[in-house]
């Protein structure tokens, strides 16, 4: 569906380490577009590769852009269209390395993990630089590339204003081998101006939802852009309270780098805290010599956390899968042992039971 940009605001102005934006979209004026979603759902964006990236690859492969190529999903297109709209160029999918190793005997990666480690932070131009012989494949090289996938973003609003939907996204930018790299979707979003029309989809996420009963307590744990769904959760709970429902206790454990520049949605959460809708615990990892992460605050609040879990709280984790989610899981397993007098095995079974009962919900990436 086509939605137009209402606002695209950088929340981390002056932050040295990253730029995080809040993007709000609505149906374009005079359009019949209507949409519905719930807090916790996703918005997807189908990106297009930048002209610089496309021309860079065409040049390396000595292609004009007019060659015809049949792609499995897109059908017959020109090489230029294939590179712009249909093939992944900014990410080096480990599956490509696997294919190159199996079919052409390239590379000495020991297994999938080695391929993943190699692929992180590299793109298709890096691959052509590493194995210049691949350039001789010309058009045929495109058959090794993966289809350009839509990017998922956790919705960072609730449909209280049904005409709008928002996301919180990090602009992916980094430098490797003296060359700046820009994430294909996040840089497209970063360049969006007010009133510009974007093609997006809304996707339901039934496994990341507020409890059916607003009186059920909730514990929200997130870091970085992992705050996104909790903005929607809080807007939704505020709406429930305004319409006369009671709200159960809510805790937010949120982690970012620096309080001064990266305290995302701080004023809104302060307001919700003043309304006694939530208690916030912030972990700013780089404001002191030793790292402070959300799990340190969970440990400090262990008694409260355990009491809420015992009284039926739903527990949410959103953000990094490999770092945040794994660390929080280990912290919670230790908490079950210390406060619930469980063995290691029982704690693990309790974690799985919370998952089965949909009281433990994760949106991690
Ligand atoms: C379920 C789900 C929910 C998500 N929700 C959000 C969200 O709410 N907000 C959000 O911002 N993102 C979210 N993401 C991530 C998002 O979908 C995209 O992956 C992200 O925006 C990057 O896409 P891109 O096209 O800009 O970057 P790409 O062009 O895909 O480039 C990404 C690649 O760049 C490399 N890279 C990235 N950072 C670095 C670095 N620091 N150093 C070296 N290399 C690096 C890696 O190789 C990585 O694979 C979510 C993902 C999933 C699966
Ligand atoms: N595929 C992509 O290109 C892409 C794009 C966007 C986001 N993401 C991923 O999405 C996630 C969110 O990114 P983000 O930059 O918003 O946030 P982030 O990198 O997860 O960082 C947010 C906070 O979490 C802290 N942190 C680091 N390790 C932690 C751990 N083990 N436990 C708890 N907290 C920890 C960070 O501290 P320090 O940094 O100070 O250690 C920082 O204060 C990350 O996984 C990120 O890689 C990926």
Image (cartoon, rainbow, N blue to C red):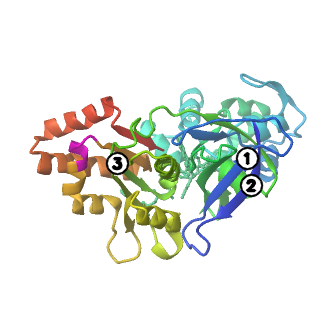
At 48% from the left and 31% from the top, the residue drawn is 206
Does residue 143 show up?
A: yes
Reading the image, the residue beneath label 1 is: 26
Task: Report whether 71 appears left or right of 322.
Answer: right
Looking at the rendering, in which quadrant would you find the N terminus? top right
Count of marks, rendered view: 3
Q: Is residue 205 above or below residue 129?
A: above
- Specify the label residue 203 is tagged with: none
Magenta stretch: dominant SS?
Answer: helix
Quarter of the figure with residue 289: bottom left
Helix, strand or loop under label 2: strand
Q: Sequence order check: which comes first, mark 2 or mark 1? A: 2
Per the image, the residue denoted by label 3 is 248
Find out whether residue 358 is within the magenta segment. Answer: no
- Looking at the picture, how far across and down is residue 191, in whole percent? 75, 57
Point 25% across, 38% down: residue: 351
In the rendered view, tell whether residue 120 sits above or below residue 278. Answer: above
**Number of other residues with Cα within 10 Å of mark 1, as a class: few under 14, some 14 to 19, many 20 or more:** many
Alpha carbons under labels 2 and 1: distance apart: 7 Å
**Residues rendered magenta in the picture:** 308-312
Contact between marks 2 and 1 (CB within 8 A): the answer is yes
Q: Nearer the viewer, mark 3 or mark 1?
A: 3
Residue at horizontal 52%, vertical 68%? 267
Where residue 6 is drawn, which disc sits there?
Answer: 2
Compare marks 3 and 1 and give the one earlier in the sequence: 1
User: Disc 3 on helix, strand or loop?
Assistant: loop
The Cα–Cα distance between marks 3 and 1, rounded to whole angstroms, is 31 Å
Q: Position of residue 249 (x, y in %)?
A: 33, 52
- In terms of depth relative to the viewer, which is nearer, 310 or 107? 310
Please state if 262 lies on the left or on the right of 133 as rendered: left
């Amino acid at each position: 569906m086509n939605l137009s940009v209402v606002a695209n605001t950088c929340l981390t102005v002056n932050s040295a380490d990253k730029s995080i934006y809040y993007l709000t979209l609505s149906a374009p004026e005079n359009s019949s577009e209507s949409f519905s979603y719930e807090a916790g759902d996703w918005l997807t964006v189908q990106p297009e590769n930048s002209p610089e990236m496309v021309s860079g690859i065409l040049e390396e492969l000595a292609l004009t852009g007019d060659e015809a190529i049949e792609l499995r999903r897109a059908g017959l297109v020109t090489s230029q269209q294939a590179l712009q709209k249909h093939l992944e160029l900014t990410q080096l999918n480990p599956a490509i390395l696997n294919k190159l190793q199996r079919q052409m005997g390239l590379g000495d990666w020991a297994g999938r993990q080695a391929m993943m480690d190699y692929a992180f932070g590299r793109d298709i131009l890096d691959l052509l630089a590493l194995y210049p012989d691949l350039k001789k494949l010309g058009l045929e090289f495109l058959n090794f590339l993966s289809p350009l996938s839509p990017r998922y973003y956790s919705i960072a609003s609730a449909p209280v204003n049904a005409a709008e939907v928002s996301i919180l996204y990090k602009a992916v930018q980094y430098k490797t081998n003296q060359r700046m790299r820009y994430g294909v979707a996040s840089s497209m979003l970063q360049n969006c101006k007010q009133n510009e029309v974007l093609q997006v989809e809304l996707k339901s996420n039934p496994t990341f939802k507020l409890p059916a009963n607003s009186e059920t307590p909730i514990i929200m744990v997130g870091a970085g852009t992992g705050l996104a769904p909790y903005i929607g959760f809080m807007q939704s709970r505020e709406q429930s309270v305004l319409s006369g429902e009671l709200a159960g206790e809510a805790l937010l454990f949120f982690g970012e780098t620096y309080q001064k520049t990266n305290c995302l949605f701080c004023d809104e959460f302060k307001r919700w805290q003043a309304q006694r809708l939530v208690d916030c615990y912030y972990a700013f990892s780089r404001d002191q010599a030793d790292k402070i992460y959300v799990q340190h605050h969970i440990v400090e609040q262990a008694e409260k956390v355990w009491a809420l879990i015992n009284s039926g709280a739903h527990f949410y984790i959103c953000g990094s899968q490999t770092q945040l989610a794994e660390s929080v899981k280990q912290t919670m397993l230790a908490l079950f042992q210390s406060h619930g007098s469980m063995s290691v095995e029982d704690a693990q079974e309790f974690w799985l039971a919370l998952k089965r009962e949909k009281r433990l919900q994760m949106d991690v990436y």
